[in-house]
Image (cartoon, rainbow, N blue to C red):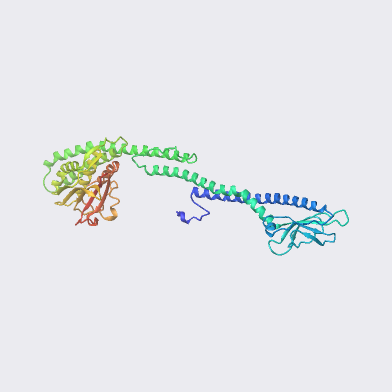
Amino acid sequence: MKKMADHPWYKPCSLRGKLLLWLVTLHLIAAGAAACASYMSYGRMVRTFMEDQMQLLANSYAGNDSTPVLQPLADDGVYQWGSFIVQIFDTEGRLLATSWPRLTAPLQAAPGLHNVRTGAGRDEDWRVYTAEAGTRVGQPRVQIAQSGSFLRHEVAHRALFAALPIALLLPVSLAVLWLVVWLSSYSLHAVAREVAAQDERSLSELSLARVPDEIAPLVTAFNSLLARLRDAFAAQRRFVQDAAHELRTPVAAIGLQLENLRAHVPAGDAAERFAQLEAGVTRAQHLIEQLLRLSRQESAAPAAVAQPVDVAALLRESLGQLMVVADRRRIDVGFDGSVAPVVSAPAAELRSVFDNLIDNALRHAPEGGVVDVRLHEVQGQPVVDVVDNGPGIPPEFIGRVFDRFFRVPGTSAAGSGLGLAIARTAALRHGLRIALLNRSENGGGEEGTGLIARVYLPV
């Protein structure tokens, strides 16, 4: 898959980028076309108006039999204000009078409008109107001139002034367009956040209230997929619960039969094989109980009512229940509570978290080992640490030990690989977080081997 940075600017990969690129391009083309049309329209209008004025002025002077006295013009009036220059010629084409002596344009042979250049500079082109020759003898000829550069500047100025609203509207329309596209994409991001918040325990349908009509069919199809997933997960949980219920009774009966049979097993090889069989049945019973507990936690049934729970008292109860396992393996269990936090959650759910973590530590600690339960604060947040002196977990498997039925290769301790999965499921349900770290990597003064299972309690 290519990254977004690999796409050239003229080939954006996002819908927002494509919309903005095409619409900006169309706006710029429309603005350019409007400017060209305004320039041509105002050019025709201004030239027609000026030509009519030149013709009227020339005809008014052409009716005189004598040479009139002309008011001299300043240079800025000619170039900046477009003043008309009046030239009076005799019938032979000799200049008799002019209102601006610097103009050297000769009398044009044919009457009418002409474009005349008197030099190579930009200001040396002129628009000239030559009046028709009079019918009386000796009647002077009249020619009116106007600066061509003034006409160009006037047309450009008026066209620019007419196109100014379009130029001002362009950034405003682009800003509105960006805002509309951003709001539309923001609603899609909100839907994406709702999708990211879903998990296998809460597959709720997505709301169509903030979804654009074009995206609604996709969200509707996704909701249909979520419904099918909910049905599939529900069927899976029902199967696990039904299977565990069906297996619990016969396995318990097998356990009772083995208990009754133990006194009749002779010593030696038969007793050793009988012990192995009994251990296998015990593991099967433990696995069935954990499957039932996991399926109940993941069920869609309403959660138990939360209530204030004294974590220190709950930990003491959990340790008291598990002291049978600790005594059987001669493990020294310690408890240190320097804080007394109270958590609002169902007591049974919290008990499930700590029971599984402590049971896991007791199983992996060596015979005659040590398991410590510490209730203290880390950076101002209350935590529960369950510390053992077992082999720990290799760093490459830290991220996988919460997977169901996963057991670290080479582990000799009995178990089903469900304890940590059950603990994490219960913890996440009530805002707790579990982190595992090896004692040698903790950096907090811990020595030796072993694992620290840290539960971050909600503040």
Q: Is residue 454 left or right of residue 118?
A: left
Where residue 457 appears, as percent x and y from the top left, is 25, 45
Q: Is residue 244 above or below residue 120?
A: above
Q: Quadrant of the C terminus?
A: top left
Q: Is residue 33 left or right of residue 186?
A: right
Q: Which residue sits at x=78%, y=57%?
A: 69
Q: Is residue 144 above or below residue 345?
A: below
Q: Does residue 222 show up?
A: yes
Q: Which residue sits at x=75%, y=60%?
A: 116
Q: Is residue 56 left or right of residue 361?
A: right
Where residue 343 appears, as percent x and y from the top left, is 24, 41
Where residue 324 appears, as percent x and y from the top left, is 14, 43
Q: Which residue sits at x=46%, y=45%?
A: 185
Camera-side residue of 350 and 48? 48
Camera-side residue of 353 and 52? 52
Camera-side residue of 454 and 199? 454
Q: Quadrant of residue 143?
A: bottom right
Q: Quadrant of the N terminus?
A: bottom left
